[in-house]
Amino acid sequence: IIKQQLIAQNIKAPVTVISNGIDLKMFKGEQRRHPGDEPRLLHVGRIAPEKNTEEVIRAFALIKRELPLARLTIVGDGPVLLDLKREASELGVADSVAFTGYVPRIELPRICHEHDVFITASAMETQGLVALEAIATGMPAVGVDAFALPELIQHGRNGYIAPAHDIPALAAAAVRLLKDAAAFSRFSREAMLIAAEHSHQRSTDRLEKIYRKFKA
């Protein structure tokens, strides 16, 4: 999407997109088993207004109507964390939502492997590193149709995409994923394949290729 925006601004130089890359030795992939009636959803990111984390809380309240034993973990800290806790309480889901606060990055792979589905409502990701890290571990994902997320969460391949700011649609996408064991298993495999395209090695190789082209 950033490439398209640059082209729209009449940038004349060639534009090549190179991923920031991910350490696949740290975020190891694992084929996930369908969680049954007790799914564990995960959201990771800075708890700030632009991340729309309150929409994740509201979607989760709708998910709970279909899957009463579902649980949600929100990893991260930020200026609206207390507001989110209040939101969870007002929606009656506080007992099913865990707020971890800040977590060192080295702990994220373990946390990812303890959960079943990654969910985000952020509509401003230019790449979406936390989504990439999550799918690298084999987690299917649910996100919104904005900026770079549809490139990582590919609708019908490793998860589902809902329109940005459409909370019922986001909830319905998560429920659809969690109620389809066959799709869940397929999405887990595909998630790892998509993440592999963004490995540090592949990103380095692409960057080196560009340098060599101009050096020649």
Image (tube, grey):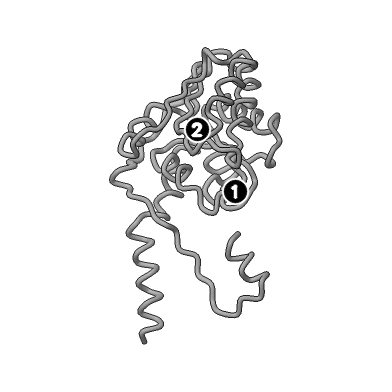
Asked if the residues shown at circle 2 and circle 1 are in contact, with their CB atoms under 8 angstroms apart, the answer is no
Q: Residues within 10 Å of mark 1 (few under 14, many from 20)?
A: some
Q: Residue at x 61, y 68 (%)?
A: 6
Which kind of residue does numbered mark 1 sit on? Met
Relative to 65, 74 lies left or right: left
Question: Which corner quadrant holds the N terminus?
Answer: bottom right
Residue closer to the observer: 101 or 116: 101
Viewer-nearest residue: 109 or 175? 109
Mark 2 vs mark 1: which is more N-terminal? 2
Q: Nearer the viewer, residue 156 or 68?
A: 68
Q: Position of residue 40 (x, y in %)?
A: 47, 23
Q: State the image coordinates of residue 57 (x, y, percent, origin top left).
A: 60, 26
* Residue identifier under label 2: 43
Residue 12, placed above or below residue 208: below
Q: Amino acid at mark 2?
A: His
Q: Secondary structure at mark 1?
A: loop
Instruction: Identify the mark at residue 124; answer none if there is no mark.
Output: 1
Identity of the residue drawn at 30% across and 38% down: 106
Question: Which residue corresponds to the image point at 54% horizontal and 54% vertical from the top-left?
Answer: 126
What separation in Å lies between label 2 and label 1 (alpha carbons)?
15 Å
